[in-house]
Image (cartoon, rainbow, N blue to C red):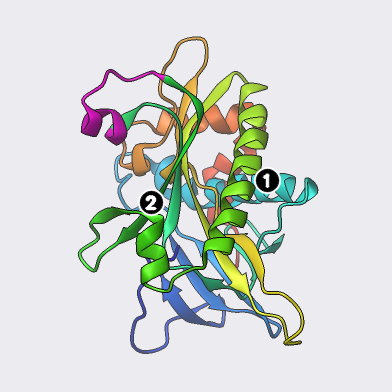
Amino acid sequence: MTQDVQKFSGVRQHSRRKALLEARTKILFDGPDPGTMVLYFKDSLDQKEDLQAASSNGALNNRFSELLMGRLGQIGVETHLIKRINMREQLVRVVDPMPFRFRVHNVLVGELAELLEIEQGMLFSEPIIELHVKNSKGVKILVAPQHVFALGWAQDEELEVIFAVIRRINDFLLGQFSALNLRLANYNLEFGRIFASDVFEPTKLVLIDAFSLDTSSILDIESGKSLDSSNCNGINWDGCKEVARRFGLLEYLGVEAIAQEVA
């Protein structure tokens, strides 16, 4: 969420909370307790032709993110997630986000294949981990660790820890998707810091934001068919629903139930 958020003037009210930051697909609000925030998942504004997609995309991303964040927590990966509040909201810890995100590639597809002018479908023997930032115009820029160090965004030791955690996350997620006959081709991860109140305690690096279908490429292993949402721009909403079905989340695509939810 670090790349897409933008501060906005005035106070926007939602669920009787003060809005802090807004991104294309999410909003951060003041939390009910000190050190907490509420992460609200917005619906897609691009699915005008599909009522179900337009009214349930946010709920699906919320539940999908909670599911995977929770499973990662069970294997010892620390995240900002505290709990899911309702169909569209999560309670999360206040974290100082790093001003860059990571893109993890397991299969050569999409933009990377186009940039390299190589036929799609190559399986990498180990994940390719890229660092990205977005400028004020929304243009995604690939940066090197040296940029991060020179700009003071992170220390060498922090990146070493994060890269090790990403490899652990990736191994786990590949297993989760493979068990459902899915191949996780690429996806985004973001990290942030939680500063200890005691100066003698170390700063924690935690996984933040959300694992979203909007920013992932997912393939069916048998057919090779793409099941990702292509940023939910109306191209492959059926793919989103198929991923939801395999993860047992189809109940979060019920338009009427979601529309009646009162945050």
- Give the number of the mark in front: 2 or 1: 1
Residue toward you, 237 or 122: 122
Q: Nearer the viewer, residue 139 or 199?
A: 199
Of the residues shown, which amino acid type is indicated by label 2? Ser
Residue type, label 1: Leu
**Left or right: where 8 falls relative to 129:** left
The disc, 2 or 1, on the residue closer to the chain's N-terminal end is 2
Which mark is drawn over residue 44?
2
Tell me which residue sits at (76%, 87%) in the image.
Answer: 198
Q: Which residue is mark 1?
A: 67
Q: Is residue 27 above or below residue 44?
A: below
- Viewer-side residue, 231 vs 168: 168
Please tell me which residue lies in front, 103 or 221.
Answer: 103
Q: Quadrant of the C terminus?
A: bottom right
What residue do we see at 30% from left, 61% from top? 134
Image check: 60 left or right of 25?
A: right
Residue for point 73% across, 44% down: 71
Above or below 43: residue 221: above
The percent position of residue 129, horizontal first and vertical second, equals 46, 43
Magenta-highlighted residues:
111-122
The reply to whether residue 24 is in sight is no
Residue 59 percent across, percent down from the top left: 55, 51
Magenta region includes residue 118: yes
Residue 116 appears in which quarter of the rendering?
top left
Q: Is the N terminus in the top left, top right, bottom left or bottom right quadrant?
A: bottom left
Up/down of 49 relative to 203, above or below: above
Helix, strand or loop at mark 2: loop
Label 1: state its secondary structure: helix
What residue lies at 36% left-to-right and 89% top-to-bottom?
A: 10
Is residue 167 visible to the viewer in this orientation of the structure? yes
